[in-house]
Image (tube, rainbow, N blue to C red):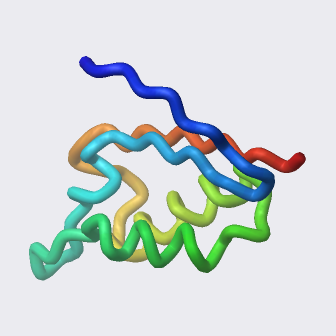
Amino acid sequence: YSEETVDLDAGDLLVLYSDGVTETFDSKENEFAEKNLTELLLNNLEHESKEIIENILDSLKEFSGDEHFDDDVTLLIVKRTT
């Protein structure tokens, strides 16, 4: 593992996630992918961290058509407010 220091300004998000988030598949074997996650995050910047996580999980369930995922889905979102 490598170590880095990053400054977060007000409104910035730190998003950590397992590969199970971006590697969730739909019924046609299309991957949710980083592109969809990025778009979802950009469309939810005004929300609190908990709400963003709930929106991502809801989107994954809708995308996959299932309540259960084939891989682990782990999310950690930190939002700096001030």
Q: Position of residue 25 (x, y in %)?
A: 20, 66
For this orientation, the residue located farthest to the left is: 29
The answer to whether 37 is drawn above or below residue 81 in the figure is: below
- Viewer-proximal residue, 25 or 40? 40
The answer to whether 63 is drawn above or below residue 5 in the figure is: below
- Viewer-proximal residue, 82 or 50? 82
- Viewer-proximal residue, 73 or 11? 11
Q: Position of residue 3 (x, y in %)?
A: 37, 20
For this orientation, the residue located farthest to the right is: 82
The quarter holding residue 27 reads bottom left
The answer to whether 68 is drawn above or below residue 2 in the figure is: below
The structure residue drawn at horizontal position 43% and vertical position 38%, both measured from the top left corner, is 74
The structure residue drawn at horizontal position 45% and vertical position 41%, both measured from the top left corner, is 16
Q: Position of residue 35 (x, y in %)?
A: 32, 74
Residue 14 falls left or right of residue 79? left
Q: Position of residue 43 (x, y in %)?
A: 61, 79
Residue 50 falls left or right of residue 57? right
- Viewer-proximal residue, 35 or 24? 35
Residue 63 falls left or right of residue 14? left
Quadrant of image for the N terminus: top left
